[in-house]
Amino acid sequence: MADHNDRTPNVPGPRQEHPAAGHGLPAAAPLLLEELDDKQPRTQALRVWWADAWNDGGVLHDRWEDLRQAPALGWHGMANWLKAVLGLAGISFVILLLDGATDALAAMLHSLLTAAPRVQVGTDTSTGVFAVIDQPIRTYIAVHSPALTISASTVYTVWQLVGLFGLIGGFARSSGARITWTAWGAASIAMVHSAAPADGRTIATGLAVLAWTAASALALRGLTLRPAFFTHIHNGGHQIEPHIHLPAPAAPEADDTPDNVHPLQKR
């Protein structure tokens, strides 16, 4: 007989039905693994990922090791992703500098070309010996520049800058600067000869030639007109000429020698 005092709950076995099924109530479905994962807090999953990433072999751990070893390994030994990041950062920095400096350089160049020559081109603003060369050049520029889109002062400034470039670059032994200096000197002498007064044209042109020649001692330093001779000394080495020597075959006996067979003669 069953003990009525036994209050042990009747747990249904694997093949037993749930007690609620007999009373017309729906049976509680067991929780699946996916539902448990969905209910897991996202912060806890993030903590687990963070801990795994910093373990040996993790993503963040490996990246940190690359950063830590980069100073000792140098550019050639560091990780490729670090080279890519540094290269992109350098290119971006240069682009930002160029973008910010373009307007400043344009404004500076414009002010240099327009504000530097405050004097009126073509007037007697220079004095002394330099005026003999400078005033004809100013006059020539003032007469021939009204049809241009830039002012005569700008043309005069460009002329000065080109001459300065040729002088400094020629002193630094630059071939292009020396060609520029030569063309600049020839153009300057031509302008002096064209715009100088008729009475003193010869003297003004001669002074321009002498001034340009004296300045060429700096711009064309090291350049000589002496022809260079290159002597090639050819030392005859040992010449090897292979020769093939074939031994002469033994002459057969007189009785066995046919008439059409002759021994090879050594020449």
Image (cartoon, rainbow, N blue to C red):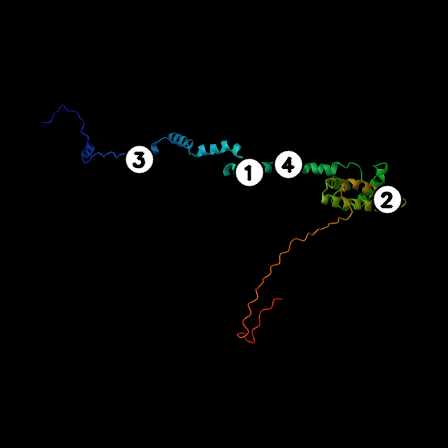
- Residue 255 position, x and y percent, is 53, 75
Distance CA(mark 4)–CA(mark 3): 62 Å
State the image quarter where residue 205 is shown. Answer: top right
Choose the circle earlier in sequence order: 4 or 1: 1
Tell me the number on the disc at residue 101: 4
Choose the circle earlier in sequence order: 2 or 3: 3
Secondary structure state at the residue bearing disc 2: helix
* Farthest residue, direction left: 1
User: Does the residue at mark 4 contact the one at mark 3 (Cβ under 8 Å)?
Assistant: no
* Farthest residue, direction top: 5
Query: Of the residues shown, which amino acid type is indicated by label 4?
Result: Ala
> Which residue is labeled 1 in the image?
87
Secondary structure state at the residue bearing disc 1: helix
**Viewer-nearest residue: 54 or 218:** 218
> Which residue is labeled 3 in the image?
33
Other residues around mark 1 within 10 Å, as few (<14) / some (14–19) / many (≥20)? few
Q: Relative to 10, is 109 above or below? A: below
Distance CA(mark 4)–CA(mark 1): 21 Å
Choose the circle earlier in sequence order: 4 or 3: 3
